[in-house]
Image (cartoon, rainbow, N blue to C red):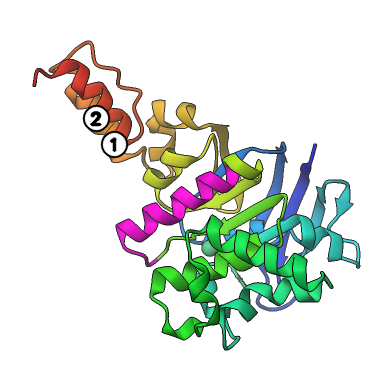
Amino acid sequence: MPINIEGLSYTYSNGGPFEKNALSDINIDINDGEFIGIIGHTGSGKSTFIQHLNGILKPTRGRVIINGIDTKQKDLKELRRQVGIVFQYPEHQLFEDTVKKDISFGLIKQGLSEEEIRKRVISALFSVGLDELILEKSPFELSGGQKRRVAIAGVVAMMPKILVLDEPTAGLDPSGRDEIFGYIKRLHRDFSMTIILVSHSMEDIAKLAQRVIVMNQGTVFMDKPSNEVYTQPGELERIGLSAPQITYLMKRLKTIFPDIDENIFTVEAAARELKKHLKA
Ligand SMILES: Nc1ncnc2c1ncn2[C@@H]1O[C@H](COP(=O)(O)OP(=O)(O)O)[C@@H](O)[C@H]1O
Ligand SMILES: [Mg+2]
């Protein structure tokens, strides 16, 4: 399995006075090209989990193997080439005086040729819908959404096989959000990247992910194909989460239109379904 996680547990400040157990016995296998959504309440361990994927955090117990590389090993260069992580509010990590320098930063560290760097920077820019004209600007002249996209481009430019995004749209307005999700979808489709998307919005996860991992108090509460997660919302509700709002609406509309398909998880799918049942 390209991503193989066995018995992963993690404790912050292990053995110290502020010891905090954040992950307990996580077992997850992920295949190449999957689009995974990770959802769960604040504090459920999502960010702690993803930081294990490129070795920023090392298992307290258990193991994390990425394409044959054990993240416990010392030399993490190859691992970091394969796994790109876009952290929450990644624009806080922009620090160069031009966008170009920021996006090239990781590539220069990898010792790539100038020509290769140029190609990668341009292609990464396009993949997040930005224009070359932005390259000489200071990141600080940009809008919030643009900054976010520059930060994502910096990770995409490394062409990771596995792209992990921790709440990539937090704090953006709805149109900025949809744009970013559109680009993530394209990266998945065009480059067959494995995408692991952390979000606390069931709506967003429902729109994008094929498989959903629900985390609760440091454990995997559910790990299922997307549609199976929402058809039985009772299980989600048990831990205070819920299916997308549109799913509940469709269930209620079924009392008026008995033929309606209630297994609907996105507004777009609901619109299509309702058109079939409503006369114009
Ligand atoms: N650096 C840290 N030191 C101690 N505890 C932490 C640290 N980071 C996170 N935690 C704790 O670990 C648990 C999981 O946190 P986190 O992985 O950030 O969850 P999520 O991303 O789902 O909100 C929480 O109880 C949180 O308070
Ligand atoms: Mg988090």
- At label 1, the amino acid type is Val
In this rendering, position of residue 171 left or right of residue 95? left
Nearest to the observer: residue 168 or residue 104? 104
**Residue at figure coordinates x 52%, y 61% from the top left:** 43
Question: For the magenta stretch, what is the residue range?
Answer: 171-188
> Within the image, what quadrant is residue 234 found in?
top left
Position of residue 49 measured from the top left corner of the image (x, y, whole percent): 65, 56
Q: Quadrant of the C terminus?
A: top left
Badge 2 marks a residue whose secondary structure is helix
Look at the image and say whether residue 107 sits in the magenta stretch: no
Vertical position of residue 280 compared to residue 8: above or below: above
Position in image of residue 124 (x %, y %): 60, 61
Q: Label 2 sits on what residue type?
A: Ala
Quadrant of the image for the N terminus? top right
Mark 2, Cα crowd under 10 Å, few <14 / some 14-19 / many 20+, is: few
Kindly indicate whether the residue at mark 2 contacts the one at mark 1 (C-beta within 8 angstroms). yes
Residue that numbered label 2 is attached to: 271
Q: Is residue 136 above or below residue 240?
A: below
In the image, ligand 1 is in what quadrant?
bottom right
Residue 101 shows up from this direction: yes
Mark number for residue 267?
Answer: 1
Residue 51 image offset from top left, x and y in percent: 68, 62
